[in-house]
Amino acid sequence: MNAGWEDLATRAHGLATHLLGRRDFDVLAAASSLDELSEALRKRGFVVPEGAISADVLELTVRRTAAARLRILSRWAGSRNAVLAVIFEDEDRRSLRAILRGAVQGAPADLRLAGIIPTPALPERALRELAAQATPRAVATLLTTWGNPYGSALLRHTESTQPDLLAIDDCLNRTFAARALRGARIAHNRTLVEYVRLVIDLENACAALVLAAGPRTDASAKQAFVEGGRHLSLAAFLQTVSAGEAGAGQRLAVAFRPAGLATAFERWAGDPAAIEHRVLRYRIAALKGAERRDPAGPAAVLGFALRVRAEVLDLRRLIWGIVLRAPRSELGAGLVSV
């Protein structure tokens, strides 16, 4: 059933025209300095502050641009925001994960914010306040005070002075999965439900890779598995964990072959970022196909949100590549957006 999606799909199409394309990235990847990159971004609609340019300033500009696009989408979605929890709360979950890990590790507040995208529920100001908290418990308490649904869920996992990061990840994933599935099922839309189920599958896959690299019991592995996916069963999840770091990728490749994601895991070499990029590239392409088949459905909206995330990842790669003096050829290679 696609009733109620036509207007938002049309607007998502329009918003997507403002995202960077291959020619834009070719120009940006050829920039030899941050000043040159900032000027190229200004010409493409990014509001880069005047004055001294640093990598942090440019990254903040990129994140603010992404946040503005998601705010527009949220405003147009209206009452459908609950249905689109899989978009907005997926970003919130990623943000909270980074902030909580930073709190456990005692990382500076700015580092905790690196690469995360503000959303209507957790705008930039809120993220900065969360990142300034000294402990995971303080983060959970502040979220609870704000009435954020992730706050109360996190309270019992942040009581210890040294909370278990995997338990925190499990909590975030379970809360997100329950809320995203509930929203998708309200919409009675197969594309949306299958999208949420794949997101759950992929989070389980990432958890399995982490568990496979360290000593974990079957009981703790079972606890990390989140129900609701389609391609990765509990049995396959446990087999992946038992296969160890060397064999985990091949196990996941078998499970995800029906979804077309086998190659993303076959080349697993202990680099989570590489997996994320390959999976994101595939999901964007798959949603473009779904959009062609059903242009009035939610695929255009979901695809736009993923392309926003991909653009942030790619621009961050270019910014820090220039800082680290990476070869120009390497900067343009492996981009997710194009």
Image: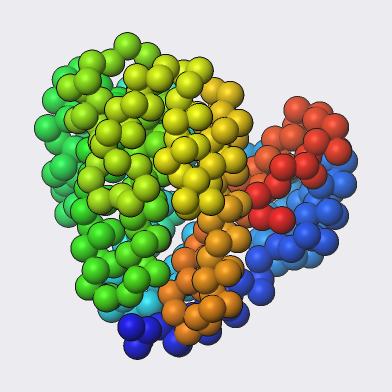
Q: Please say if 10 is above or below 159.
A: below
Specify whether 142 is left or right of 212. left
What quarter of the picture does the C terminus occupy?
A: bottom right
Judged from this view, the residue extending furthest toward the top is 215
Q: Residue at x 27, y 76 (%)?
A: 188
Residue 284 lies, in percent from the top left, at 57, 59
Q: Residue at x 60, y 60 (%)?
A: 285
What quarter of the picture does the N terminus occupy?
A: bottom left
Q: Please say if 9 is above or below 156.
A: below
How many numbered marks have been drawn onto this rendered protein structure? Answer: 0
Residue 53 in view, yes or no:
yes
Residue 217 lies, in percent from the top left, at 23, 16
Q: Residue at x 54, y 78 (%)?
A: 293
Residue 96 lies, in percent from the top left, at 34, 41
Q: Nearer the viewer, residue 38 or 85?
A: 85
Colour mapping used in the image: rainbow
Specify whether 303 is left or right of 40. left
Specify whether 243 is left or right of 64. left
The image quarter containing residue 321 is top right
Q: Nearer the viewer, residue 237 or 105?
A: 237
Q: Nearer the viewer, residue 256 or 20?
A: 256
Residue 223 lies, in percent from the top left, at 19, 30
Residue 103 in view, yes or no:
no
The image quarter containing residue 48 is bottom right
Q: Please say if 201 is above or below 193.
A: above
Q: Residue at x 58, y 77 (%)?
A: 292
